Amino acid sequence: LRIPIAHIEGGEISEGAIDNAVRHALTKMSHVHFTSTFEARERVISLGEEEWRVHRAGAPSIDHLRRNTLFTREQLEQQLHIDLTKPSVVVAYHPVTIVRDTTQEADALFAALLQVPGQILFCYPNADAGGRELVQRTKQFLAQRPDARVFVNLGALTYWSLLRQVDLMIGNSSSGIMETPSFALPAVNVGMRQQGRERARNILDAAPDAADILAKVEIARSQPFRRSLEGMQNPYGEGHASEKIVDVLTSVPLGEKLLIKKMR
């Protein structure tokens, strides 16, 4: 119907997920692009998109972090029925959809988590193939660790508030890459799911190996590493993506100039 498409967060790479191919396909179908990072903008342009179509806006999720008032520790404790004065770790782990066995890296993760000290707070995995198996593995883990909890759906504001209060994040979620830098929160990224995505200096990559995960957790919890994150910036934006997107959408030329795409 000749309706132009605006694509948000194109140009990023997550080699361990089938989303990677879908994301690049959407780039070629779209007419205006709003990337999260400057590197992603250059990558979209390298795919043949004209430069005037491609705008670095930042990730819209960072806008919510800037605009919303996050819950206090006391509010979170009351809402989630947990004690956040204890050392706490958020785990957000999803299936690795680029491989046939989408949970093949999970053995290493759960073996490592059994040895990670502190309160373990799981977020439910997403709906990708293998998600149900990860839910079952998590429930089995809870039976072994009475100080662990699992939350089916925290809600965005509660989740971000929790990231501000805990000591560490472990997993392979894009949130670990894109949102933890806004809190200068140490994050251990496990395995290949986010392979290729840009990282801030709070991210420590670990192989899907229990010993390596534990080694990175030890670094992440060290005072020198935590001090090194002071004043860090998030490469995924400053919290003003929506204004930039609106500015472009209200001024971009409509008609054939927008619809007819030329290869650079």
Image: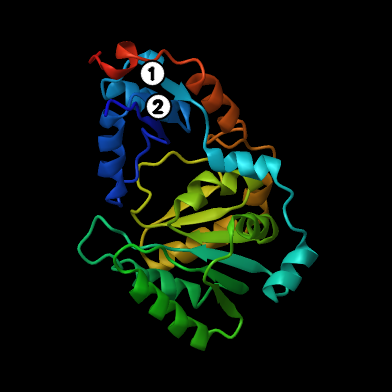
Measure the C-alpha gap from mark 1 to mark 2. Answer: 6 Å
- Residue drawn at (52%, 71%) of the image: 152
Q: Is 71 located above or below residue 115 in the figure?
A: above
Q: x%, y% of residue 164?
A: 68, 55
Dot 1 or dot 2: first in sequence order is: 2
Residue found at the very far left of the displayed protein: 100
Residue depicted at 59% across the width and 86% down the height: 146
Q: Quadrant of residue 81?
A: bottom right
Q: x, y (%) of residue 34?
A: 44, 28
| Residue at x-position 25% and y-position 13% | 264
- Image disc number at residue 44: none
**Circles 1 and 2: CB distance less than 8 Å?**
yes
Dot 2: element: strand
- Amino acid at pointer 1: Arg
As drawn, 249 above or below 262: below
Where 188 sits versus 195, above or below? below
Left or right of residue 169: residue 162: right
Question: In this figure, which residue is indicated by the disc labeled 2?
Answer: 33
Q: Is residue 8 above or below residue 53?
A: below
The residue labelled by disc 1 is: 53
The percent coordinates of residue 204 (x first, y second) are 49, 51
As helix, strand or loop, the secondary structure at mark 1 comes to: helix
User: Does residue 158 show up?
Assistant: yes
